[in-house]
Image (cartoon, rainbow, N blue to C red):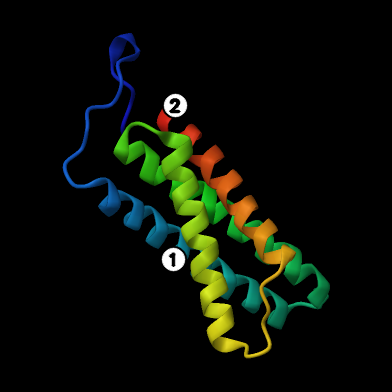
């Protein structure tokens, strides 16, 4: 377990590039989302849970995944938590929007997409700050 050194010194810089750590954080968030979405699908299949609840569960999983991936990337990078976390959050949302546009022909980009990108940045920035400071 990584513990902060004595006298509150910052973490030493890790080997590897910033983009490598950002990519690892993004992949961590995507893998976490995939596993949790499979569990949600199994939960919906095995229980009498209404499908309306699934939408809220999917949003919660996405936000937790962004927080976790951004915190991981920012902790590994060691500085610029809000910016690096925000990059992970925006990349996560853009990847999901691109996947949705690829799968659904009638998908349009509008204010809902812009708000999702903004929320991705906000949750990513919060996760990045958390990862650098704790």
Outermost residue, top direction? Answer: 7
Outermost residue, front direction? Answer: 110
Residue 115 higher or lower than 12, as above or below = below
The residue sitting at 56% across, 38% down in the picture is 126
Q: Which mark lies nearer to you, 1 or 2?
A: 2
Residue 123 higher or lower than 42, as above or below = above
The residue sitting at 51% across, 56% down in the picture is 90
For the residues labelled 1 and 2, the Cα–Cα distance comes to 24 Å
Left or right, 107 with respect to 134, comes to: right
Percent across and percent down for residue 50 are 83, 75
- Provide the residue designation for mark 2: 133
Outermost residue, bottom direction? Answer: 105
Percent across and percent down for residue 45 are 70, 83
Q: Quadrant of residue 84?
A: top left
Can residue 134 be seen from the camera position used here?
A: no
Mark closest to the chain's N terminus, 1 or 2: 1
The C terminus sits in image quarter:
top left
Figure disc tally? 2
Dot 1, how many residues are within 10 Å of its Cα: few (below 14), some (14-19), or many (20+)? Answer: some
Circle on res. 31: 1
Circle on res. 116: none
Percent across and percent down for residue 15 are 16, 42
| 12 vs 81, nearest the viewer | 81
């Amino acid at each position: 377990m990584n513990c902060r050194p004595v006298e509150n010194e910052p973490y030493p810089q890790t080997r590897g590039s910033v983009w490598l750590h950002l990519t690892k954080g993004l992949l961590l968030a995507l893998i976490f989302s995939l596993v949790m979405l499979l569990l949600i699908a199994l939960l919906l299949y095995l229980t009498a849970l209404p499908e309306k609840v699934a939408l809220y569960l999917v949003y919660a999983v996405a936000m937790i995944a962004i927080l976790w991936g951004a915190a991981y990337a920012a902790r590994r990078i060691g500085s610029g938590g809000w910016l690096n976390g925000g990059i992970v959050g925006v990349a996560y949302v853009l990847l999901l929007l691109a996947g949705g546009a690829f799968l659904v022909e009638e998908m349009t980009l509008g204010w809902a997409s812009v708000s999702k990108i903004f929320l991705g940045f906000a949750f990513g920035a919060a996760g990045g700050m958390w990862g650098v400071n704790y």
